[in-house]
Image (cartoon, rainbow, N blue to C red):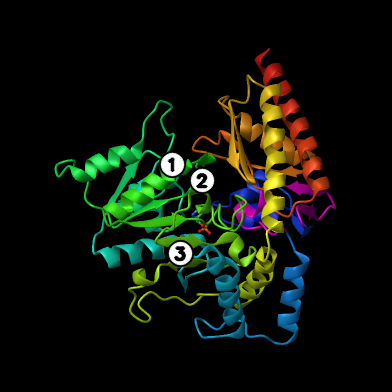
Amino acid sequence: MDIALFEQYESNVRGYIRSFPTIFDTATSATMVDVDGKRYIDFFGGAGSLNYGHNHPLVNQALINYIQRNGVGNALDKATMAKHDFIESFQNTILKPRKLDYKIQFVGPTGTNGVETALKLARKMKQRSNVIAFTNAYHGHTLGALAVTGNEFYHDDYYGVPLNVNKLPFDHYFDQDFDSMDMLRHYLQDGSSGYDLPAAIIVESIQGEGGINVASVEWLQKLAELCKDFDILLIMDDIQVGNGRTGDFFSFERAGIKPDIVTLSKSIGTGLPMSIVLMKPEVDVWEPGEHTGTFRGNSHAFVAGTAALTLWKNEDFSTSIRAKGTQVEGEFNKIKAQYPEWISDVRGLGMIWGLESKVAGFCAEVSHQAFERGLLMETAGADNHVLKFLAPLVISESELSEGFEILQAAIAATVAKYIEEKL
Ligand SMILES: Cc1ncc(COP(=O)(O)O)c(C=O)c1O
């Protein structure tokens, strides 16, 4: 077995295999092991799809039981016990305690399918085609989702021109005091601003891929208010930072807002393919079967997701996420204080954190040095200028401290390398 097989036969488009060039074989909690038995602490967390860690015992046992009793596998969108139990637990454990009244649409299995659906639904409901999205936004790679994604690396006009989208600065996009919500309100009140009234505004409350940009509570509240005032639907893309990443189940809970549409994917199925769109009942304007597809709901993902939702039955999980998050923030601030010339910012919330460097290539080199030493950590941001912490929320104390020891060593090695190369 050899990594060369992937180079020979797998498309050039392969990505993460290039950052982490080994063949992984087994994994538990926040530790992955490759075919040579080398351990890696996982600060990458499947890009947010492994909030409950690798092979969580509750999830594994539920899946084993389901398969052993020949539970239905693929059922398209027929009713199954697996789907019944998922809907029931999601309503009872997540939505009702938060006084959120949403209907659930099961869509194709990845996040971008959810975004595509949300945009289509909003446009249909409001009978308007324009949508507003933000700088540094990341919403996926199907054409509608790409049109609301910022990073030019993913765009090309020959994929189709991203019509009907206006881009606005995200919160704190400019260093100086500038509020894009004030600007938008002004634009929408001015009939000659050139801004068409949008059907929807799509936003991440924390931009993950865009570089760990945390929107303030005030900005999110202003956004929600503006949507209400102008009859615009607010779509919250919680695909990366929902499912407990911030300490709350939904990332927008901290702002006390109730978006009209919410997209969830990644960890909702504990990393098995599953994507859902939540919509206020009055937004559910679909005709039966109007937006369809073969893989709308995967039975094994329902079973796995239902098992994981039991962790939300009381406050303990949230409390542990917040405590670990505070520890990570402390470690990151320590690193910034230690390397002021190399690290320019620390930002995040809960269990998503970023270390920003303005030194070209620095974060990619740290990621490489970390991998060599047994730590998986990716970069984010338009110029890969942010080192991103997105470990499973269930990471243990010992995995966390082992990971931070490796990170320290990787940063020291990177700094030494830069200094040596300059000399
Ligand atoms: C906020 C957000 N939306 C949408 C997506 C797209 O999800 P997927 O890669 O499953 O299509 C991602 C993926 O990283 C994401 O972070």
Is residue 308 left or right of 186 when viewed as pictured?
A: right
**Residue 41 inside the magenta-drawn segment:** yes
**Residue 81 inside the magenta-drawn segment:** no
Query: Cα distance, mark 1 to mark 2?
Result: 14 Å
Which mark is drawn over residue 113? 3
Q: Amino acid at mark 1?
A: Glu
**Residue visible at 71% across and 22% down?**
338
Which mark is drawn over residue 206? 2
Residue 105, can we see it? yes
Decide: marks 3, 1 in contact (CB < 8 A)? no
Between 392 and 406, the residue placed more toward the observer is 392
Q: Amino acid at mark 3?
A: Asn
User: Label 3's element?
Assistant: helix
Residue 76: image location, x then y, percent: 51, 81
User: Label 1's element?
Assistant: helix
**Residue visible at 36% across and 31% down?**
178
Query: Cα distance, mark 3 to mark 1?
Result: 30 Å
State which mark lies toward you, 3 or 2.
Answer: 2
Q: Which residues are magenta?
A: 29-53
Dot placed on the residue nearer the N-terminal end, 1 or 2: 2
243 over 196 or under it: above or below = below
| Circle 1 residue | 218
Q: Amino acid at mark 2?
A: Ile
Dot placed on the residue nearer the N-terminal end, 3 or 2: 3
Q: Quadrant of residue 58?
A: bottom right
Q: Is the residue marked 3 within 8 Å of ligand 1, measured from its CB?
A: yes
94 over 294 or under it: above or below = above
